Image: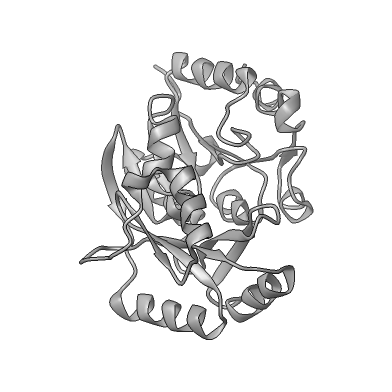
Amino acid sequence: MIMQKIFFFDIDGTLAIHGVIPESNLKALQLLKERGYYTFICTGRSPFYAQNLFANLVDGLITCNGRYILYHHQKLHGEAFSKEELYDYQEKIKKLEAGAMFVSDNVAVPYLLDEKQIQEIQKEYGKQHIQLLPKDLSFYTFDLFYDSLSKRDELIEAFQKELVINDHGGHGSCDCSTIGFDKGDGIAYLLNHFHIDKADAYAFGDGYNDQAMFREVGHAIAMGNAVEELKQKATYITDSIDCDGIMKALIHEGIA
């Protein structure tokens, strides 16, 4: 009988570089599949973005920084914002003179974004996934958009009690992890669902929002290119994404 284990992977900077998965990481995912272990993406990205690129490579997806979970292409759990929460976020963003992209099940809705910003997100997510006139939708997360580093720092300060803000490398946007339900809560939900012990759970990450993942697993693996705050919480620091970091960690952990 297989001793069941479960593996969680952040996307950007961990499993993929600008949406492209290095060959070594593809081999690592295939190895885990052959061993019969559960594999999940765990990302701040939208469900439709993660499904489009990774759904056939793993068993499931934790998206929206923990608030939206799919297993074998089916929605397993969703933590949508209440109408009050959504209104409060929108009012605060407006007051701070920033913009946002609110993420629903199959579409994202721009909020206070200019035409250039909308075109950029349409290019990344596909026009079919961008809805300019929102109807009765549930929203699970949002990206914030800013026009300067000082504005980004202002957003981080303003939302510090509600969100962990993960900057997208100075490209004018960042994803938001809610303190009330984050990547770690998504992982805890799945460990309970599959009856897997924390000692048999592995998480790979590189960003600030991945600290929540490390809270809920026994094996917390930071990439060599990870932020320093994450490395301090890791049980093991592997090599960087472009130097076979995931496969090297699997060898270190006795998996490969």
> 8 or 116: nearer the eye?
116
Name the residue: 30% across, 32% down: 72
Give the vertical position of 96 relative to 172 (above or below): below
Quarter of image, res 11: top right
> 201 or 64: nearer the eye?
64
Residue lying farthest left?
136
Residue 44 appears in the figure? no
Residue 164 appears in the figure? yes
Q: Using residue 41 as the reference point, say whether residue 97 is left or right of it.
A: right
Name the residue: 53% across, 15% down: 31
**Quick one: quadrant of the C terminus?**
top right
> 229 or 49: nearer the eye?
49
Give the vertical position of 181 relative to 44 (above or below): below
Coordinates of residue 100 in the picture (x, y in percent) = 48, 67
Coordinates of residue 75 in the picture (x, y in percent) = 27, 44
Coordinates of residue 193 in the picture (x, y in percent) = 33, 44
Give the vertical position of 233 relative to 191 (above or below): below
> 116 or 1: nearer the eye?
116
**Quick one: quadrant of the N terminus?**
top left
- Number of labels in the image equals 0
Name the residue: 47% across, 44% down: 123
* Color theme of the render: one colour
Coordinates of residue 152 in the picture (x, y in percent) = 67, 70
Quarter of image, res 62: top left
Name the residue: 71% across, 38% down: 223
